[in-house]
Amino acid sequence: MLRVLRCGGGGLAPVEAGPDWVLPDDVAWIDLTNPERAEELIAEKALGVLLPTREEMAEIEVSSRLYQEDGASFMTAFVLVGADGDDPALEPVTFVLARGRLITIRYVDPRAFVAYAAQADRDADFCRGGVEAFLGLLDALIDRVADILEKTSADVEVISAEIFRPSHKAPFKPILRRLGRAQSIAAKARSSLVSLARLLSFAALSDEIADSKE
C-alpha cells in the first residue's frame, strides 16, 4: 500500500498511483506498507532514488542499513512489534530522507506509526515537512519502547512478589515462562533502542537534519 501525508492535514491517505504519477509538492511523508513491486517502482520514479528491497532491509551489517546515495539518506532500524501478544519480534523499518521528504518502507504495523498518523490526522499543523515527520515518528517509537519497558518492569515486580510470598504453593513452571517472556521483551527493547540510537547518530550527518531547528 502506498499512502501519503500532505502538509496541511488530512492524515495518511492511500494513493491510486499509476506509472506516470507525479509526486505533489506538498507531500511530507510517503509510507509504503507491504508494498507491491509496482508501488515500489512508482515511488522510485517519482522520487528519483532506488529504494531497498525487503531482503536488503534485513541485512545485519550496519553499513548496509545506514548509507547515503543519490543525495538521500537511507536508514533502517529494528523496531519491537507484538510486545502485547504472544510473539514479540524485532522487524526492520526503513526511513529515507530525500529532497525534504520522508519515505518509510515497512512490512509490519508498529503501534507508534498508528499513533503518529492519528495525531497528524487530528491536527492540520502537526506535520510541516519530511524532517518533522521523521523526528515525530522516532519520538513515537521511543515513547512506545519506554511504555513497553515500564510495563515489563511492573510485570517482573508482580512475579517477584508472587515468588517470595510466604504462602506461595503454586507450581513454578508458569512463573518461569512469564519471567522468560519478560526477559525476552526487555532484551528486544534494548536491541531496538541501540538500533534507533545508531540511526539517530547517522541521521545527524544528513543536510536535512543538520539544517533543521527541530
Image (tube, helix red, strand yellow):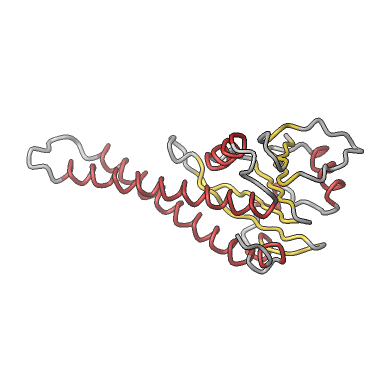
Residue 92: horizontal and vertical position, in percent? 61, 49
Residue at 69 percent of width and 37 percent of height: 34
Relative height, residue 40 to residue 210 (above, below): above
Image position of 20 (left or right of 136): right
Q: Could you tell me which quadrant the C terminus lies in?
A: bottom right
Near-viewer residue (75 or 98) = 98
Q: Could you tell me which quadrant the N terminus lies in?
A: top right
Residue 32: horizontal and vertical position, in percent? 71, 41
Residue at 66 percent of width and 69 percent of height: 205
> How many numbered marks are there?
0
Residue 61: horizontal and vertical position, in percent? 63, 63
Residue 86: horizontal and vertical position, in percent? 43, 35
Image position of 161 (left or right of 95): left
Residue at 22 percent of width and 40 percent of height: 172
Point out the residue furthest to the right here: 20
Residue at 79 percent of width and 42 percent of height: 40
* Picture quadrant of residue 206: bottom right
* Picture quadrant of residue 39: top right
